[in-house]
Structures are given as structure tokens and as C-alpha cells.
Image (spheres, grey):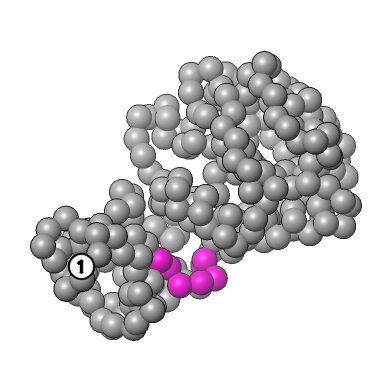
Amino acid sequence: MIKYQTFLKDNEVFDLKLKPNIVCIGFFDGLHKMHKKIFNKTKKIAKEEQMIWSIITFSEKVSDFLKGVKSSLESRNRKYQNIEKNYLPDYLFEINVNNESIKLTANQFCLFLKDKLNVKKVVVGDDFRFGYKGEGKVSDLQNFFGIDNIIVFKRVSNISTSLIKENLAKGEIKKVNSIIDENFTTTFKKTGEKLFLIEDYNIVIGNGQYLVVINGKTSQIQLENNAVILDNKEEILDIEFLKKV
């Protein structure tokens, strides 16, 4: 996977070897079932039609940028590591969200996709918005690229990043694991002699006892205020949550 950061500028050049490109676009926070379906569909079409496939995402949510807040469920590094490990797109383009890039019109954004990234097909959710103040809709993509070249996934009410956050806060790990279709894993960082704190800033997991996997071994931990006491010499731990006990 080759990763590019783009500012959506006219003078940017990307070495795509002039191959037709199918892209899926979204913030993809939390990587739940619908995100995975979108990735797999994009990858499948690319293989069938001998195209390259790419993921286009954003440095942060536009709404977060405008409000000056951070609401992402996971860090960009963790998200990109998961994408590369599990899906391996040819390219990942991260749009830098700033005062200039958010002012591009919907048509300018479409032209950037076509002229700079050689995009022929696009896979998105039906609530996707783009361009200045979210003026662009799926119908605008269809008008620009052709209706047959835009693959649309309908939003499912019981699968969302906000629902993941809600269930984590309640300690409903089994529900979270069902939404993401795997066991929820997050990183803990040592902040004291034996104290480990959740590193991803916007994850809040309800207090209680949990059955987890640490370094391949199943054990039980007591989580309080996003922190756990562990007798472990490592500075960073990835903890996989199985269920609340």
C-alpha cells in the first residue's frame, strides 16, 4: 500500500502508472462491518475489471476541524495499519483537511478525482457529502462519472461508529465485537509503575471486569476510568477485549 497525503492542489502529481482507478471514499472511523463491505466490494470490482483500487480518506472529520474538537474513535496510525494489514489497497490517499481544502466545490473535487487520480469508478455510502459546505451528493458523483460508475451502499442504522462508542461506554463489548465483526482491540500505554491507560484519546470503555487477550494469553482485568493495573514490563500493550464478566 502506497500512502499519499494530498492538499487537493492543481500542482500535485501522483505516480499511478496511468491505470484506471476505482476508489472508495470516507472517514472510515472504527472500521465496522459496512466499512469492510465497502472495501471488499471496491477490491472485487478492481480485480474483475483489472483496475487499481484506492481508499480516499481524511486527516480529520470536517465537522471536527470546524469545531476545533477531536471525536475520532481511533488514531490515524491504528486505522491505517488495520487497512494495510487486512485489505492492502494499492493506494491510500489522505486528504489534509484545512481552510483551503474544505472550500473546494463539488465539481472541483470531482475534477481532482478524474484528472489527478484517474478515477473511473467510486464506491461510497448513500450519505456521503463532499465539496464546500457539503454541497456535493451521491447524485453529483453519478452525474459526473455516470450512474453505472457509482456504487452506493445504504446506511444501516444498527451499524455505525457512534453506536460503537455508545456500547464501549456501557461496557457492551459483545455488541461492539458484533458491529466490527472481530474482537475490539485498543492500545494501552504505561503511565506509572504498573498503571496502563488507553492511548486512543476518544475511546471510553465502561468500568468493570473484562475477559481479554494480552500477548496471546487470555486473562481478566479490572478497568477503571480507562486505566488498568498490570504487572507487565512493556511500555505499550495491545489488549483484545472478549467480553465483560
Residue at image coords 65%, 55%: 88
Placement of 138 over or under 195, stated as above or below: above
Q: Which is nearer the eye, 115 or 150?
A: 115
Q: In this rendering, does residue 204 appear at all?
A: no
Q: Secondary structure at mark 1?
A: loop
Expressed as whole percent of the image width and height from the top left, the position of residue 148 reads: 88, 45
Question: Is 182 part of what is drawn in magenta?
Answer: yes
Q: Is residue 193 left or right of residue 61?
A: left
Expressed as whole percent of the image width and height from the top left, the position of residue 86 reads: 60, 62
Q: Residues within 10 Å of mark 1 (few under 14, many from 20)?
A: few
Amino acid bearing label 1: Lys
Would you identify the image quadrant in which residue 109 lies? Answer: top right
Residue at image coords 83%, 39%: 19
Would you identify the image quadrant in which residue 150 lies? Answer: top right
Image mark count: 1
Q: In this rendering, does residue 151 appear at all?
A: yes
Placement of 182 over or under 42, stated as above or below: below
Q: Is residue 17 left or right of residue 224?
A: right
